[in-house]
Image (cartoon, rainbow, N blue to C red):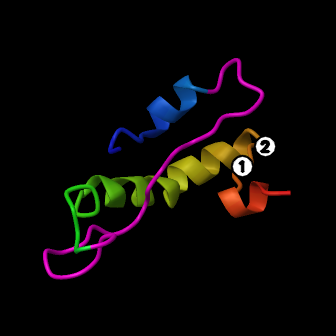
């Protein structure tokens, strides 16, 4: 997590028919709320989640995808 940049994204594409991104975008949990189970762990409190969210919502990524006819789908959209 936290290494999502347009440059890193582009590096994965040259010879691929499809690319799977494993991301956990979202807002970091606080000490008082969130997480799975018994409160937030280090993973759910990571600011890298916000970095991924901002990247996926960025104009730069969306412009790149549009200009290269690349479409993203969510896991649910990919299910039969």
Whether residue 45 sits left or right of residue 56 in the image: it is left
Magenta segment boundaries in residue numbering: 13-37
Q: Is residue 67 depicted above or below 39 in this figure?
A: above
What residue is drawn where x is 77% and y is 54%? 78
Q: Between residue 42 and residue 53, name the one nearer to us.
A: 42
Marks 2 and 1 close (CB-CB < 8 Å): yes
Name the quadrant of the N terminus.
top left
The tally of labels here is 2
Residue positioned most to the top: 15
Q: Is residue 23 depicted above or below 13 in this figure?
A: below
Q: Is residue 68 depicted above or below 55 in this figure?
A: above
Tell me the tag on residue 56: none
Q: SS of the residue at dot 1?
A: helix
What residue is drawn where x is 42% and y is 40%? 5
Q: SS of the residue at dot 2?
A: loop
The residue labelled by disc 2 is 69
Q: Is residue 74 something that shows in the picture? A: no
Q: Residue 19 at x, y = what percent?
A: 66, 34
Q: CA distance from mark 2 to mark 1?
A: 5 Å
């Amino acid at each position: 997590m936290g290494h999502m940049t347009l440059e890193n994204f582009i590096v994965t594409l040259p010879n691929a028919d499809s690319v799977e991104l494993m991301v956990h975008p979202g807002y970091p949990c606080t000490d008082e709320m969130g997480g799975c189970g018994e409160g937030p762990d280090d993973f759910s409190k990571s600011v890298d989640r916000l970095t991924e969210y901002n990247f996926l919502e960025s104009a730069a990524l969306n412009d790149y995808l549009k200009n290269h006819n690349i479409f993203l789908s969510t896991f649910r959209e990919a299910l039969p």
